[in-house]
Amino acid sequence: MSSPWQDPNQPQHWQQPEGQQYDQYGQPIYPQAPLEQQQGYYDNTASQQGYSEYPQQAYDQGQQGYYGYQQEQAHQDWPQGQPAQQPAQQFNQQQFGQQQFAQYDGFQQSQQAYTPLNPTWMGQVEPQNYTPAPNYAPTQPIQPVWTHQQARRTKRTLNVVLLVAITCIVVALLAIFLVLPNLYRAAGPAGIMVGFLLSLFPLAAVLLTVYFIDRWEPEPRWMLGFALLWGAAGSIGTTLLIQPVWIKLFMPDDLSKAEASQWLASFEAPPVEEFSKGLGILLIALFARKYFDGPVDGVVYAATIAAGFAFTENIQYFGRTFVDPDGGALSLSIIFIIRGIFSPFGHALYTACTGVAVGYAARKGNSGMIIGFFFIGLIPAMIFHYIWNSAPSLFEPTDIASFLGSVFLQSVVYEGPLIVLWGVGIYFLRKSEAKLTHRRLAEYAQSGWFTPEEVNMIATPAGRRNAMAWAKTYRRTQPMKEFIRKSTSLAYTRQRILVGASQRQNQQDEQGLLDEITALRPLVLG
Protein backbone atom coordinates (compact mmCIF):
# COMPACT_ATOMS: atom_id res chain seq x y z
CA MET A 1 0.00 0.00 0.00
CA SER A 2 1.50 3.34 -0.99
CA SER A 3 1.32 6.40 1.19
CA PRO A 4 -0.71 9.41 0.00
CA TRP A 5 0.77 12.74 -0.88
CA GLN A 6 1.97 14.67 2.11
CA ASP A 7 1.52 18.38 1.56
CA PRO A 8 4.85 19.93 2.64
CA ASN A 9 3.12 23.19 3.46
CA GLN A 10 0.46 21.54 5.68
CA PRO A 11 2.02 18.56 7.48
CA GLN A 12 -0.81 18.56 9.99
CA HIS A 13 -3.15 17.42 7.21
CA TRP A 14 -1.18 14.31 6.27
CA GLN A 15 -3.36 11.23 6.11
CA GLN A 16 -2.12 7.82 7.22
CA PRO A 17 -3.68 4.69 5.59
CA GLU A 18 -4.82 1.88 7.80
CA GLY A 19 -2.53 -1.10 8.29
CA GLN A 20 0.73 0.82 7.74
CA GLN A 21 2.48 3.32 9.99
CA TYR A 22 4.45 6.29 8.64
CA ASP A 23 6.73 8.77 10.32
CA GLN A 24 6.15 12.54 10.20
CA TYR A 25 8.00 12.75 6.87
CA GLY A 26 5.77 10.23 5.11
CA GLN A 27 8.27 7.35 5.20
CA PRO A 28 7.06 3.80 6.08
CA ILE A 29 8.00 2.61 9.56
CA TYR A 30 9.29 -0.98 9.63
CA PRO A 31 10.24 -2.98 12.72
CA GLN A 32 13.97 -3.25 13.28
CA ALA A 33 16.22 -5.23 15.55
CA PRO A 34 18.07 -3.62 18.47
CA LEU A 35 21.18 -1.78 17.38
CA GLU A 36 23.49 -4.14 19.19
CA GLN A 37 22.26 -6.99 16.98
CA GLN A 38 22.79 -5.20 13.68
CA GLN A 39 25.94 -5.88 11.68
CA GLY A 40 28.00 -2.83 10.84
CA TYR A 41 26.86 -0.80 13.83
CA TYR A 42 29.71 1.17 15.27
CA ASP A 43 30.15 3.98 17.73
CA ASN A 44 33.08 6.29 16.98
CA THR A 45 34.73 8.89 19.16
CA ALA A 46 32.31 11.57 18.02
CA SER A 47 29.32 9.33 18.99
CA GLN A 48 28.31 9.30 15.32
CA GLN A 49 26.08 6.33 14.55
CA GLY A 50 26.62 4.51 11.27
CA TYR A 51 26.19 1.18 9.59
CA SER A 52 28.26 -1.07 7.39
CA GLU A 53 26.86 -0.94 3.87
CA TYR A 54 26.83 -4.70 3.32
CA PRO A 55 25.50 -7.45 5.61
CA GLN A 56 28.52 -9.70 5.11
CA GLN A 57 31.23 -7.03 5.06
CA ALA A 58 33.08 -6.53 8.36
CA TYR A 59 36.01 -4.26 9.04
CA ASP A 60 38.75 -4.54 11.64
CA GLN A 61 39.77 -1.47 13.53
CA GLY A 62 42.30 0.47 11.49
CA GLN A 63 41.48 -1.43 8.27
CA GLN A 64 40.69 0.69 5.23
CA GLY A 65 36.97 0.53 4.58
CA TYR A 66 34.55 1.46 1.84
CA TYR A 67 35.74 4.52 -0.12
CA GLY A 68 38.76 4.85 2.19
CA TYR A 69 36.86 5.41 5.46
CA GLN A 70 38.37 4.10 8.71
CA GLN A 71 35.68 2.07 10.44
CA GLU A 72 35.91 0.37 13.81
CA GLN A 73 35.35 -3.29 14.63
CA ALA A 74 32.00 -4.48 13.30
CA HIS A 75 29.74 -6.25 15.75
CA GLN A 76 27.35 -9.14 15.31
CA ASP A 77 25.86 -9.96 11.94
CA TRP A 78 22.49 -8.66 10.95
CA PRO A 79 19.80 -11.14 11.92
CA GLN A 80 18.03 -12.63 8.94
CA GLY A 81 15.28 -10.34 7.72
CA GLN A 82 16.83 -6.97 8.59
CA PRO A 83 17.68 -4.28 6.00
CA ALA A 84 21.31 -3.89 4.94
CA GLN A 85 21.24 -0.10 4.93
CA GLN A 86 20.68 2.42 7.66
CA PRO A 87 16.92 2.41 8.36
CA ALA A 88 14.85 5.35 7.22
CA GLN A 89 13.94 6.20 10.81
CA GLN A 90 17.61 6.78 11.65
CA PHE A 91 18.21 8.85 8.53
CA ASN A 92 15.23 11.13 9.18
CA GLN A 93 16.44 13.55 11.82
CA GLN A 94 14.02 15.47 14.01
CA GLN A 95 15.73 18.71 13.04
CA PHE A 96 13.78 19.04 9.79
CA GLY A 97 15.95 20.41 7.00
CA GLN A 98 19.12 20.67 9.12
CA GLN A 99 22.48 19.03 8.42
CA GLN A 100 24.84 17.00 10.54
CA PHE A 101 28.43 16.38 9.57
CA ALA A 102 30.91 13.61 10.34
CA GLN A 103 34.59 13.53 9.43
CA TYR A 104 36.08 10.42 7.79
CA ASP A 105 39.81 10.74 7.04
CA GLY A 106 39.48 14.33 5.89
CA PHE A 107 36.44 13.55 3.70
CA GLN A 108 33.50 15.47 5.09
CA GLN A 109 30.13 13.75 4.83
CA SER A 110 26.78 15.39 5.46
CA GLN A 111 23.58 13.76 6.60
CA GLN A 112 20.57 15.82 5.58
CA ALA A 113 16.91 15.13 6.17
CA TYR A 114 14.86 15.21 3.00
CA THR A 115 12.03 17.68 2.56
CA PRO A 116 9.60 17.19 -0.33
CA LEU A 117 9.29 20.92 -1.02
CA ASN A 118 11.12 21.93 -4.22
CA PRO A 119 12.16 25.29 -5.65
CA THR A 120 10.23 26.08 -8.81
CA TRP A 121 13.39 26.10 -10.93
CA MET A 122 13.94 22.46 -9.99
CA GLY A 123 10.53 21.42 -11.29
CA GLN A 124 7.73 21.71 -8.76
CA VAL A 125 6.44 18.34 -7.56
CA GLU A 126 2.68 18.36 -7.91
CA PRO A 127 0.57 16.43 -5.33
CA GLN A 128 -1.03 14.18 -7.93
CA ASN A 129 2.40 13.10 -9.21
CA TYR A 130 4.04 12.27 -5.90
CA THR A 131 4.98 8.66 -5.22
CA PRO A 132 7.45 7.56 -2.54
CA ALA A 133 10.74 6.02 -3.62
CA PRO A 134 10.57 2.21 -3.94
CA ASN A 135 11.34 0.72 -0.55
CA TYR A 136 14.26 -1.65 -0.26
CA ALA A 137 12.75 -5.04 0.68
CA PRO A 138 12.76 -4.91 4.49
CA THR A 139 12.89 -8.70 4.81
CA GLN A 140 15.82 -9.26 2.44
CA PRO A 141 19.42 -8.02 2.60
CA ILE A 142 20.93 -6.57 -0.57
CA GLN A 143 22.07 -9.36 -2.86
CA PRO A 144 23.81 -8.88 -6.23
CA VAL A 145 21.71 -9.92 -9.22
CA TRP A 146 24.89 -10.87 -11.11
CA THR A 147 28.64 -10.52 -10.71
CA HIS A 148 30.43 -10.25 -14.03
CA GLN A 149 27.85 -9.48 -16.71
CA GLN A 150 27.43 -6.03 -18.16
CA ALA A 151 24.55 -3.97 -16.78
CA ARG A 152 21.55 -4.28 -19.04
CA ARG A 153 20.26 -1.24 -20.89
CA THR A 154 16.74 -0.04 -20.45
CA LYS A 155 14.61 -0.19 -23.57
CA ARG A 156 14.27 3.01 -25.54
CA THR A 157 10.76 4.26 -25.94
CA LEU A 158 8.95 4.13 -29.26
CA ASN A 159 9.09 7.93 -29.43
CA VAL A 160 12.88 7.90 -29.37
CA VAL A 161 13.07 5.26 -32.08
CA LEU A 162 10.67 7.22 -34.27
CA LEU A 163 12.59 10.43 -33.63
CA VAL A 164 15.89 8.93 -34.71
CA ALA A 165 14.50 7.02 -37.69
CA ILE A 166 12.35 9.79 -39.18
CA THR A 167 14.85 12.55 -38.50
CA CYS A 168 17.74 10.59 -39.99
CA ILE A 169 15.71 10.06 -43.16
CA VAL A 170 14.84 13.76 -43.35
CA VAL A 171 18.42 14.80 -42.61
CA ALA A 172 19.76 12.43 -45.26
CA LEU A 173 17.38 13.84 -47.88
CA LEU A 174 18.28 17.41 -46.95
CA ALA A 175 21.98 16.62 -47.08
CA ILE A 176 21.78 14.87 -50.44
CA PHE A 177 19.51 17.32 -52.25
CA LEU A 178 20.32 20.65 -50.55
CA VAL A 179 23.42 20.80 -48.33
CA LEU A 180 25.96 18.95 -50.47
CA PRO A 181 24.88 20.57 -53.78
CA ASN A 182 25.05 23.99 -52.11
CA LEU A 183 28.58 23.30 -50.84
CA TYR A 184 29.63 21.97 -54.23
CA ARG A 185 28.38 25.08 -56.04
CA ALA A 186 30.05 27.40 -53.54
CA ALA A 187 33.45 25.75 -53.13
CA GLY A 188 33.90 22.77 -55.45
CA PRO A 189 35.70 19.55 -54.46
CA ALA A 190 39.02 21.25 -53.60
CA GLY A 191 37.34 23.98 -51.57
CA ILE A 192 35.23 21.44 -49.67
CA MET A 193 38.34 19.45 -48.73
CA VAL A 194 40.25 22.51 -47.50
CA GLY A 195 37.20 23.89 -45.72
CA PHE A 196 36.58 20.55 -44.06
CA LEU A 197 40.10 20.38 -42.62
CA LEU A 198 40.10 23.98 -41.36
CA SER A 199 36.61 23.61 -39.86
CA LEU A 200 37.78 20.78 -37.62
CA PHE A 201 39.65 23.22 -35.33
CA PRO A 202 36.68 25.32 -34.14
CA LEU A 203 34.54 22.17 -34.06
CA ALA A 204 37.00 20.49 -31.69
CA ALA A 205 37.09 23.56 -29.43
CA VAL A 206 33.30 23.60 -29.02
CA LEU A 207 32.93 19.83 -28.57
CA LEU A 208 35.65 19.76 -25.88
CA THR A 209 33.75 22.50 -24.04
CA VAL A 210 30.55 20.46 -24.35
CA TYR A 211 32.35 17.43 -22.92
CA PHE A 212 33.49 19.50 -19.92
CA ILE A 213 29.98 20.81 -19.27
CA ASP A 214 28.38 17.38 -19.64
CA ARG A 215 30.55 15.55 -17.11
CA TRP A 216 28.06 15.59 -14.21
CA GLU A 217 25.30 13.60 -15.90
CA PRO A 218 26.63 12.63 -19.36
CA GLU A 219 24.15 12.35 -22.20
CA PRO A 220 24.22 9.20 -24.34
CA ARG A 221 26.78 9.46 -27.11
CA TRP A 222 24.26 8.43 -29.73
CA MET A 223 22.01 11.34 -28.67
CA LEU A 224 24.91 13.77 -28.92
CA GLY A 225 25.71 12.27 -32.32
CA PHE A 226 22.12 12.88 -33.35
CA ALA A 227 22.39 16.50 -32.20
CA LEU A 228 25.63 16.99 -34.13
CA LEU A 229 24.08 15.44 -37.23
CA TRP A 230 21.05 17.68 -36.96
CA GLY A 231 23.27 20.74 -36.69
CA ALA A 232 25.55 19.79 -39.59
CA ALA A 233 22.80 18.73 -42.03
CA GLY A 234 19.28 19.09 -40.64
CA SER A 235 19.50 22.71 -39.51
CA ILE A 236 21.48 23.73 -42.61
CA GLY A 237 18.90 22.08 -44.86
CA THR A 238 16.02 23.69 -42.94
CA THR A 239 17.72 27.07 -43.31
CA LEU A 240 18.07 26.58 -47.05
CA LEU A 241 14.36 25.74 -47.26
CA ILE A 242 13.14 28.71 -45.20
CA GLN A 243 15.61 31.28 -46.55
CA PRO A 244 13.96 31.92 -49.98
CA VAL A 245 10.52 32.28 -48.38
CA TRP A 246 11.87 34.70 -45.77
CA ILE A 247 13.64 36.80 -48.40
CA LYS A 248 10.53 36.96 -50.60
CA LEU A 249 8.33 38.04 -47.71
CA PHE A 250 10.53 40.56 -45.89
CA MET A 251 13.49 41.73 -48.01
CA PRO A 252 13.09 45.23 -49.54
CA ASP A 253 13.40 45.42 -53.32
CA ASP A 254 15.44 48.62 -53.63
CA LEU A 255 18.65 47.53 -51.87
CA SER A 256 22.09 47.74 -53.37
CA LYS A 257 24.35 44.69 -53.41
CA ALA A 258 26.18 45.79 -50.24
CA GLU A 259 22.93 46.69 -48.49
CA ALA A 260 21.37 43.37 -49.48
CA SER A 261 24.38 41.50 -48.08
CA GLN A 262 24.14 43.36 -44.79
CA TRP A 263 20.37 42.84 -44.63
CA LEU A 264 20.81 39.09 -45.09
CA ALA A 265 23.40 39.00 -42.30
CA SER A 266 21.35 41.10 -39.87
CA PHE A 267 17.67 40.39 -40.59
CA GLU A 268 17.62 37.00 -42.30
CA ALA A 269 20.36 34.90 -40.71
CA PRO A 270 19.49 35.40 -36.99
CA PRO A 271 15.80 34.41 -37.09
CA VAL A 272 16.07 31.69 -39.74
CA GLU A 273 19.25 30.05 -38.45
CA GLU A 274 18.26 30.16 -34.78
CA PHE A 275 14.87 28.65 -35.55
CA SER A 276 16.49 25.88 -37.61
CA LYS A 277 19.01 25.05 -34.89
CA GLY A 278 16.47 25.33 -32.11
CA LEU A 279 14.15 22.95 -33.92
CA GLY A 280 16.59 20.12 -33.15
CA ILE A 281 16.48 21.00 -29.43
CA LEU A 282 12.69 21.00 -29.54
CA LEU A 283 12.58 17.58 -31.21
CA ILE A 284 14.82 16.05 -28.53
CA ALA A 285 12.81 17.63 -25.71
CA LEU A 286 9.47 16.44 -27.09
CA PHE A 287 10.36 12.94 -28.30
CA ALA A 288 13.34 11.95 -26.13
CA ARG A 289 12.38 13.39 -22.75
CA LYS A 290 14.22 10.68 -20.81
CA TYR A 291 17.48 12.20 -22.11
CA PHE A 292 16.52 15.83 -21.46
CA ASP A 293 16.62 16.61 -17.74
CA GLY A 294 17.06 20.36 -17.43
CA PRO A 295 18.85 23.56 -18.48
CA VAL A 296 22.33 22.00 -18.47
CA ASP A 297 21.16 19.33 -20.90
CA GLY A 298 19.65 22.14 -22.96
CA VAL A 299 23.04 23.88 -23.13
CA VAL A 300 24.76 20.60 -24.05
CA TYR A 301 22.38 19.78 -26.90
CA ALA A 302 22.26 23.40 -28.09
CA ALA A 303 26.05 23.74 -28.19
CA THR A 304 26.40 20.39 -29.99
CA ILE A 305 23.82 21.37 -32.61
CA ALA A 306 25.45 24.78 -33.00
CA ALA A 307 28.86 23.14 -33.40
CA GLY A 308 27.52 21.02 -36.26
CA PHE A 309 25.87 24.02 -37.89
CA ALA A 310 29.04 26.13 -37.65
CA PHE A 311 31.08 23.21 -39.00
CA THR A 312 29.11 23.04 -42.26
CA GLU A 313 28.90 26.81 -42.52
CA ASN A 314 32.66 27.13 -42.02
CA ILE A 315 33.29 24.58 -44.78
CA GLN A 316 31.41 26.87 -47.15
CA TYR A 317 33.15 30.06 -45.98
CA PHE A 318 36.66 28.58 -45.99
CA GLY A 319 36.17 26.65 -49.20
CA ARG A 320 34.66 29.57 -51.11
CA THR A 321 37.49 31.84 -50.03
CA PHE A 322 40.06 29.23 -51.03
CA VAL A 323 38.75 28.91 -54.61
CA ASP A 324 38.10 32.64 -55.04
CA PRO A 325 40.59 33.92 -57.66
CA ASP A 326 40.70 37.31 -55.91
CA GLY A 327 41.22 35.72 -52.49
CA GLY A 328 44.36 33.73 -51.92
CA ALA A 329 46.16 32.72 -48.76
CA LEU A 330 45.77 36.14 -47.12
CA SER A 331 41.98 36.17 -47.46
CA LEU A 332 41.76 32.58 -46.27
CA SER A 333 43.89 33.41 -43.21
CA ILE A 334 41.69 36.40 -42.40
CA ILE A 335 38.45 34.45 -42.59
CA PHE A 336 39.95 31.63 -40.50
CA ILE A 337 41.06 34.12 -37.82
CA ILE A 338 37.59 35.66 -37.71
CA ARG A 339 35.56 32.46 -37.61
CA GLY A 340 38.01 29.95 -36.16
CA ILE A 341 39.81 32.01 -33.51
CA PHE A 342 37.78 35.13 -32.66
CA SER A 343 34.32 33.57 -32.73
CA PRO A 344 34.30 29.76 -32.61
CA PHE A 345 31.66 29.84 -29.85
CA GLY A 346 29.33 32.34 -31.51
CA HIS A 347 26.61 29.94 -32.61
CA ALA A 348 26.89 27.94 -29.37
CA LEU A 349 26.37 31.09 -27.27
CA TYR A 350 23.28 32.17 -29.19
CA THR A 351 21.58 28.77 -29.40
CA ALA A 352 22.31 28.07 -25.72
CA CYS A 353 19.62 30.65 -24.87
CA THR A 354 17.04 28.43 -26.56
CA GLY A 355 18.50 25.35 -24.90
CA VAL A 356 18.26 26.82 -21.40
CA ALA A 357 14.64 27.87 -21.94
CA VAL A 358 13.61 24.47 -23.34
CA GLY A 359 15.54 22.67 -20.59
CA TYR A 360 13.76 24.64 -17.90
CA ALA A 361 10.39 23.75 -19.41
CA ALA A 362 11.41 20.10 -19.87
CA ARG A 363 12.14 19.83 -16.15
CA LYS A 364 8.59 21.04 -15.45
CA GLY A 365 7.22 18.13 -17.44
CA ASN A 366 4.71 19.83 -19.73
CA SER A 367 4.90 19.53 -23.54
CA GLY A 368 2.85 22.68 -24.08
CA MET A 369 5.22 24.64 -21.87
CA ILE A 370 8.20 23.21 -23.77
CA ILE A 371 6.84 24.57 -27.06
CA GLY A 372 6.05 27.94 -25.49
CA PHE A 373 9.48 28.30 -23.92
CA PHE A 374 11.07 27.26 -27.20
CA PHE A 375 9.75 30.44 -28.83
CA ILE A 376 10.65 32.50 -25.75
CA GLY A 377 14.22 31.19 -25.87
CA LEU A 378 14.49 32.09 -29.56
CA ILE A 379 14.14 35.80 -28.76
CA PRO A 380 17.47 36.33 -26.91
CA ALA A 381 19.18 33.90 -29.29
CA MET A 382 18.11 36.00 -32.28
CA ILE A 383 19.03 39.26 -30.54
CA PHE A 384 22.57 38.12 -29.66
CA HIS A 385 23.03 36.75 -33.18
CA TYR A 386 21.78 40.02 -34.68
CA ILE A 387 24.17 42.12 -32.60
CA TRP A 388 27.18 40.06 -33.70
CA ASN A 389 26.25 40.09 -37.39
CA SER A 390 25.41 43.80 -37.37
CA ALA A 391 28.37 45.08 -35.36
CA PRO A 392 30.97 45.20 -38.19
CA SER A 393 28.81 47.62 -40.15
CA LEU A 394 28.83 50.04 -37.22
CA PHE A 395 32.61 50.49 -37.44
CA GLU A 396 32.63 51.15 -41.24
CA PRO A 397 36.06 49.58 -41.90
CA THR A 398 37.85 50.91 -44.96
CA ASP A 399 40.63 48.33 -45.35
CA ILE A 400 41.72 44.92 -44.08
CA ALA A 401 43.48 46.31 -41.01
CA SER A 402 40.48 48.33 -39.88
CA PHE A 403 38.17 45.40 -40.59
CA LEU A 404 40.27 43.05 -38.45
CA GLY A 405 40.43 45.74 -35.77
CA SER A 406 36.65 46.04 -35.74
CA VAL A 407 36.23 42.27 -35.49
CA PHE A 408 38.77 42.10 -32.65
CA LEU A 409 37.05 44.93 -30.79
CA GLN A 410 33.72 43.25 -31.34
CA SER A 411 35.07 39.99 -29.91
CA VAL A 412 36.57 41.66 -26.83
CA VAL A 413 33.77 44.11 -26.07
CA TYR A 414 30.81 41.94 -26.99
CA GLU A 415 31.56 38.23 -27.23
CA GLY A 416 34.14 38.21 -24.41
CA PRO A 417 31.68 39.33 -21.70
CA LEU A 418 29.05 37.04 -23.22
CA ILE A 419 31.40 34.06 -22.81
CA VAL A 420 32.10 35.07 -19.20
CA LEU A 421 28.38 35.38 -18.51
CA TRP A 422 27.82 32.01 -20.17
CA GLY A 423 30.49 30.40 -17.99
CA VAL A 424 29.04 31.87 -14.78
CA GLY A 425 25.59 30.65 -15.77
CA ILE A 426 26.91 27.14 -16.43
CA TYR A 427 28.61 27.12 -13.02
CA PHE A 428 25.39 27.89 -11.15
CA LEU A 429 23.38 25.49 -13.29
CA ARG A 430 25.86 22.75 -12.45
CA LYS A 431 25.45 23.54 -8.74
CA SER A 432 21.69 23.22 -9.11
CA GLU A 433 22.19 19.84 -10.82
CA ALA A 434 24.24 18.65 -7.84
CA LYS A 435 21.57 19.88 -5.44
CA LEU A 436 18.86 18.02 -7.35
CA THR A 437 20.96 14.85 -7.37
CA HIS A 438 21.42 15.03 -3.59
CA ARG A 439 17.76 15.74 -2.95
CA ARG A 440 16.48 12.85 -5.05
CA LEU A 441 19.06 10.27 -3.90
CA ALA A 442 18.27 11.18 -0.30
CA GLU A 443 14.82 9.70 -0.88
CA TYR A 444 16.39 6.40 -1.92
CA ALA A 445 18.66 6.54 1.13
CA GLN A 446 15.58 6.84 3.30
CA SER A 447 14.21 3.71 1.63
CA GLY A 448 17.44 1.76 2.18
CA TRP A 449 19.07 1.78 -1.28
CA PHE A 450 21.99 4.06 -0.34
CA THR A 451 23.76 5.17 2.80
CA PRO A 452 23.93 8.90 3.61
CA GLU A 453 27.68 8.76 2.92
CA GLU A 454 27.05 7.37 -0.55
CA VAL A 455 24.55 10.15 -1.30
CA ASN A 456 27.18 12.76 -0.49
CA MET A 457 29.82 10.85 -2.41
CA ILE A 458 27.65 10.84 -5.56
CA ALA A 459 26.12 14.30 -5.23
CA THR A 460 29.22 16.41 -4.54
CA PRO A 461 32.21 17.09 -6.82
CA ALA A 462 34.61 16.55 -3.92
CA GLY A 463 32.95 13.26 -3.05
CA ARG A 464 33.25 12.03 -6.62
CA ARG A 465 36.92 12.96 -6.78
CA ASN A 466 37.66 11.10 -3.55
CA ALA A 467 35.70 8.07 -4.67
CA MET A 468 37.43 7.91 -8.05
CA ALA A 469 40.84 8.33 -6.41
CA TRP A 470 40.04 5.44 -4.06
CA ALA A 471 38.78 3.29 -6.94
CA LYS A 472 41.87 4.02 -9.00
CA THR A 473 44.06 2.80 -6.16
CA TYR A 474 42.32 -0.59 -6.24
CA ARG A 475 41.87 -0.68 -10.03
CA ARG A 476 38.11 -0.40 -9.84
CA THR A 477 37.75 2.86 -11.76
CA GLN A 478 35.24 1.61 -14.32
CA PRO A 479 32.80 0.01 -11.82
CA MET A 480 32.95 3.12 -9.64
CA LYS A 481 32.39 5.36 -12.66
CA GLU A 482 29.37 3.28 -13.68
CA PHE A 483 28.06 3.30 -10.10
CA ILE A 484 28.17 7.10 -10.00
CA ARG A 485 26.70 7.47 -13.49
CA LYS A 486 23.82 5.05 -12.89
CA SER A 487 23.04 6.66 -9.54
CA THR A 488 22.93 10.12 -11.09
CA SER A 489 20.63 8.84 -13.83
CA LEU A 490 18.44 7.37 -11.11
CA ALA A 491 18.09 10.78 -9.47
CA TYR A 492 16.94 12.38 -12.74
CA THR A 493 14.63 9.48 -13.50
CA ARG A 494 12.91 10.04 -10.17
CA GLN A 495 12.63 13.74 -10.93
CA ARG A 496 10.79 12.93 -14.15
CA ILE A 497 8.48 10.60 -12.21
CA LEU A 498 7.65 13.30 -9.67
CA VAL A 499 6.77 15.90 -12.30
CA GLY A 500 4.49 13.41 -14.05
CA ALA A 501 6.46 12.80 -17.27
CA SER A 502 5.81 9.32 -18.80
CA GLN A 503 5.49 7.79 -15.35
CA ARG A 504 5.04 4.16 -16.43
CA GLN A 505 8.16 4.17 -18.61
CA ASN A 506 10.19 6.08 -16.05
CA GLN A 507 9.14 3.74 -13.25
CA GLN A 508 10.36 0.80 -15.34
CA ASP A 509 13.64 2.64 -15.92
CA GLU A 510 13.83 3.38 -12.18
CA GLN A 511 13.58 -0.29 -11.25
CA GLY A 512 16.10 -1.25 -13.91
CA LEU A 513 18.58 1.31 -12.60
CA LEU A 514 18.09 0.11 -9.02
CA ASP A 515 18.86 -3.45 -10.12
CA GLU A 516 21.98 -2.32 -12.00
CA ILE A 517 23.22 -0.23 -9.08
CA THR A 518 22.72 -3.16 -6.70
CA ALA A 519 24.65 -5.40 -9.08
CA LEU A 520 27.52 -2.91 -9.35
CA ARG A 521 28.15 -2.87 -5.60
CA PRO A 522 30.19 -6.10 -5.42
CA LEU A 523 32.24 -4.98 -8.42
CA VAL A 524 33.04 -1.69 -6.69
CA LEU A 525 34.05 -3.52 -3.53
CA GLY A 526 36.09 -6.06 -5.48
Image (cartoon, rainbow, N blue to C red):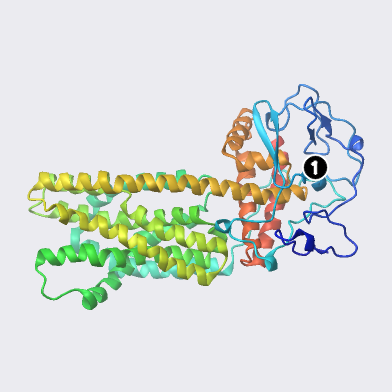
Identify whether 218 is placed above or below 132. above
524 or 77: nearer the viewer = 77
Quarter placement of the N terminus: bottom right
Q: Element at badge 1? A: loop
Could you tell me if residue 465 is visible in this image? yes
Residue 195, given in percent of the width and then of the height, sits at 24, 51
Residue at (65%, 53%) from the top-left corner? 152
Residue that label 1 marks: 86
Quarter placement of the C terminus: top right
Is 424 situated left or right of 504 in this image?
left
285 or 473: nearer the viewer = 285
Residue 313, given in percent of the width and then of the height, sits at 27, 57
Residue at (58%, 60%) from the top-left corner? 123
Identify whether 377 is placed above or below 403. below
Q: Quadrant of residue 158?
A: bottom right
- Name of the residue lying farthest toward the top: 62
Q: Amino acid at mark 1?
A: Gln
390 or 334: nearer the viewer = 390
Residue 26, given in percent of the width and then of the height, sits at 78, 56
Residue at (72%, 41%) from the top-left corner? 452
Residue at (61%, 66%) from the top-left corner? 501
Residue 332, given in percent of the width and then of the height, sits at 16, 48
Identify whether 414 is placed above or below 454. below
Is 304 situated left or right of 93 in this image?
left
- Local packing at callout 1 (Cα closer than 10 Å; few below 14, some 14-19, many 20+) is many
Could you tell me if residue 176 is visible in this image? no
- Name of the residue lying farthest toward the bottom: 249
Is 486 situated left or right of 60 in this image?
left
Identify whether 53 is placed above or below 172. above
